[in-house]
Image (cartoon, rainbow, N blue to C red):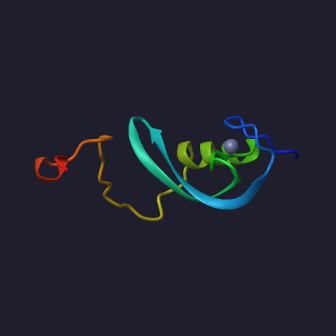
Amino acid sequence: MTFQCHVCGSQEAKQEFVQEVFQVNEKPVLVEHIPASVCRSCGEMVFSPETTEMIRKTLHGEAHPVRTMQMDVFNFGQFPEEVGVV
Ligand SMILES: [Zn+2]
């Protein structure tokens, strides 16, 4: 399979296991150890159709989470007052 990054057009990718947050019923869930092609140029992650299908089955099927964690959510560019002024 020939890789071509849909963001920057680079054809060089490395195979990596990544983690990604998905929304399921408006609830964020984290999936770890997803095999992905990662663009060497810009870092864009691309999942194969098989991988995408497997993620869908995992999230909407009978699979149970292996662990639960709390997530801190940030707004981009939002700092507390005291560090906001440099
Ligand atoms: Zn790229």
Residue extending furthest toward the right: 1
Q: In the picture shown, does residue 4 fall above or below 80?
A: above
Would residue 69 be found to the left or right of residue 42 on screen? Answer: left
Report x, y in % for residue 42: 64, 47
Identify the residue at horizontal 11%, vertical 52% (top origin).
Answer: 82
Residue at (19% x, 50% y) in the render: 86
Residue sitting nearer the eye, 38 or 40: 40
Residue 41 image point, x, y percent:
69, 49
Assign ligand 1 to one image quadrant: top right
Question: In screen coordinates, is 6 left or right of 31?
Answer: right
Residue farthest bottom in this picture: 67
Residue 78 pos. (x, y %) = 24, 42
Side (left or right) of 50 relative to 45: right
Residue lying at the far front in this picture: please name it. Answer: 86
Q: Is residue 25 above or below residue 29?
A: above
Question: In the depicted view, which residue is nearer to us: 45 or 23?
Answer: 45
Estimate the x, y position of residue 13 in percent, counting from the top left. Answer: 76, 53
- State which quadrant residue 75 falls in: top left
Going by the image, does 54 lie left or right of 71?
A: right
Please state the total of marks drawn on the protein image.
Answer: 0
Residue closer to the observer: 40 or 65: 40
